[in-house]
Amino acid sequence: MRINRRAFGLAAAAAATALVLAACGQESTGTTDTADSAADDGETPVIGLVMKSLGNPYFQAMQTGAEAYDTESEDFELRAVGIQSETDIAGQVEAVNNLVAQGVDAIVIAPADSIALVAPLIEADAQGISIVNIDVKLDDDALEQAGLDIPFVGPDNVEGARQVGMVLAEDLGEGAKVAILEGIQGAANAEQRKEGFEAAVAEGGLDLVASNTANWETEQANTVFTNILGANPDIQGVMAANDSMALGALAALEASGQLGEIKVVGFDNVPEVEPYLADGSMLATLDQFGSDQAVYGIDVALDLLAGEQAEDWVKTDIELITGE
């Protein structure tokens, strides 16, 4: 396997390029030539990277990492695309279809929906395109029904969320009232993180008073958590399934004058949460190394193109991050 075969530094490039991407609102990058080039000439393989919302700092970092890898490597040609919002499933389906039409050699995908994105991948597989699933696991039943065997490259979301949740539990103590801000219902990573949070609730003896989706979005999380606060004025903590939603909860707390009083934990370790970790209003987040996720997936895709076998689950690293 090529996993981690290069230990090149991406942090500085990631920070600079992510800021540029955020300012430009860029939706797609990489080579835009038609498929008559590398995909057909038998030379450098063309790999399509399909991400979720590029408005999310996590996927900005993922894109930056993939582009840095593309720049440093002569092993492949990258075509990267993202969608405008976390719920733009149709846009992601279209992106896959476009890459299939271009005749790319491999597709590395972080699906916006674990079931809906299986359908366009059937045609990709029929065209002989190698497929690697990263970040969000495609639904096992849907894959089986489609007759697809696609390796997954990504973290243990359940264990990561449990670790983050236990930081909150240990800080608040048994009986503390908490809420969960969930990702998109039905998405594998959203369900897994909810499962991990619920495990921490049980292990830490917390009182879960609300568990609602905010669809990974900051503004939705602000609204959802504001409503939770209104219904539960004695709440003491919140577990957000990603840092975008954690930022929405923090904004709601700041508006209500309770920032620092009600504790928050998140998931992803995006740069925007660092000040809140530093001042203690956010207790913890979970780094799943977003800038490396696509790199790992690309390496597995290159292995598949070379005729090698891939494990069903190539587990990637996670690291608990606290203010300390």
Image (cartoon, rainbow, N blue to C red):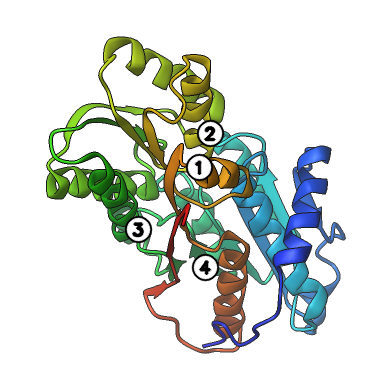
| Label located before the other in sequence (2 or 4) | 4
Q: Is residue 49 left or right of residue 15?
A: left
User: 4 or 251, which is in the foreground?
Assistant: 251
Residue under the image location 56 percent in, 43 percent down: 273
Q: Which residue is mark 4?
A: 132
| Residue that numbered label 2 is attached to | 247
Report the side of 154 relative to 247 (left or right).
left
What's the residue type where badge 2 is placed?
Leu
Circle number at residue 284: none
Task: Label 1: state its secondary structure.
Answer: helix
Q: Nearer the viewer, residue 157 or 95?
A: 157
Q: Where does residue 67 sit, x and y in percent of width and height?
A: 76, 65
Q: Kindly identify which residue carries mark 3.
A: 160
Give the CA distance from mark 3 to mark 4.
Answer: 22 Å
CB contact under 8 Å: marks 1 and 2:
yes
- Between the residue at mark 1 and the residue at mark 2, the CA separation in whole angstroms equals 6 Å
Q: Which residue is mark 1?
A: 243
Front tag of 1 and 4: 1
3 or 4: tag closer to the N-terminus: 4
Q: Is residue 206 visible?
A: yes
Q: Of marks 2 and 3, which one's residue comes earlier in the chain?
A: 3
* Mark 2 and mark 4: Cα distance apart in space: 31 Å
The foreground one among 158 and 83 is 158
Q: Amino acid at mark 3?
A: Gly
Q: Residue at x 79, y 42 (%)?
A: 26
